[in-house]
Amino acid sequence: MARDPFSSPDALERHFRERGFIDQYGGAPSATRDHYSRVLVPGGEPNFLLSAHVMSGRNSGDLQVGHQAIFHESQGAEVMVELIHVVNELFAAAGRGDPTGFLAEALQGGEDREQDFGDVRLLVCFPEREPDQDFENIYVQASRQLRAGEWDAWIGENPLRAAVTADEDSAAAAQAACRAILEARGHPLAGGDLKVSMSSAMGEDRLDVLRSRDGASLWLTTTPSGARRLSIVHGDGRREDF
């Protein structure tokens, strides 16, 4: 029997991977002991931008997937059909009923709406448009509240624990690399507190963005060969490249 996609973050990810979704930009998840996040996108090349953002955490208290579609106005009908299809597949696999009617009314109506399907809440949101915006934006979120102790139980499981360990190891490696570069040049930031604020894949390279206590941003790029480049942007706009 297939596992309920809403039973855990890795089960929710597996549901989309089995339907051709892949990691956005080849990136790794953002994983800590309090939060988990991974963005997946269709493996093909649709005519519009579509994502499935799987998230959960101790503080948020839920397990959710958010679908964002960004498209031109002329693609509205195509996007509506695809969103309904993607969400229907999820709800069918999860045994949470048929959201077709609700989604069709909400997407055609153009107003924010939400409805509960058992323990899963389905939300359709139309983010506020910017004055010069030349594209359409729709957000559809399905979420389930966590039960007491559920997050801690997940952290102890192999898939989530491995992601947390990998993320912590990568952050520690980025901090050590930055300090080594700074110490080699006698830079005053070498002895300061550096915290990783973002990590992502940039093509074949890895980018880690760290922040110092005084507000400087340190951009560390690591190539597949292990070579590293460091750029520092200070709060006053000064930039240093190493």
Image (spheres, rainbow, N blue to C red):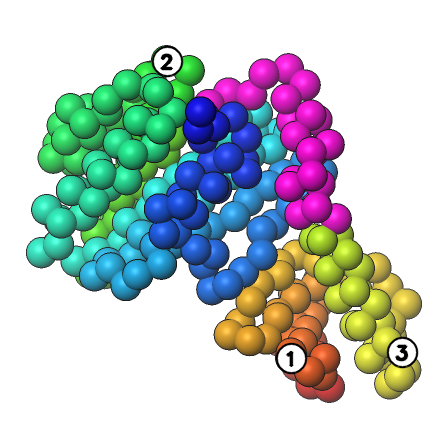
In whole angstroms, how far apart are the C-alphas of marks 2 and 3? 57 Å
| x then y, percent, for residue 2 | 44, 28
Q: Is residue 162 magenta?
A: yes
Image point (80%, 72%), residue name: 177
**Quadrant in which residue 73 is drawn:** bottom left
Q: Quadrant of the C terminus?
A: bottom right
- Give, as a three-letter code, the residue at label 3: Glu
Residue under pointer 1: 223
Q: Quadrant of the N terminus?
A: top left
Q: Is residue 2 visible?
A: yes
The vertical placement of 160 against 118, above or below, is below
**Quadrant in which residue 106 is drawn:** top left
Q: Is residue 125 magenta?
A: no
Residue under pointer 2: 118
The circle on residue 183 is: 3
Dot 3 crowding, Cα within 10 Å, few <14, some 14–19, many 20+ = some
In whole angstroms, how far apart are the C-alphas of marks 1 and 3? 21 Å
Secondary element at tag 1: loop
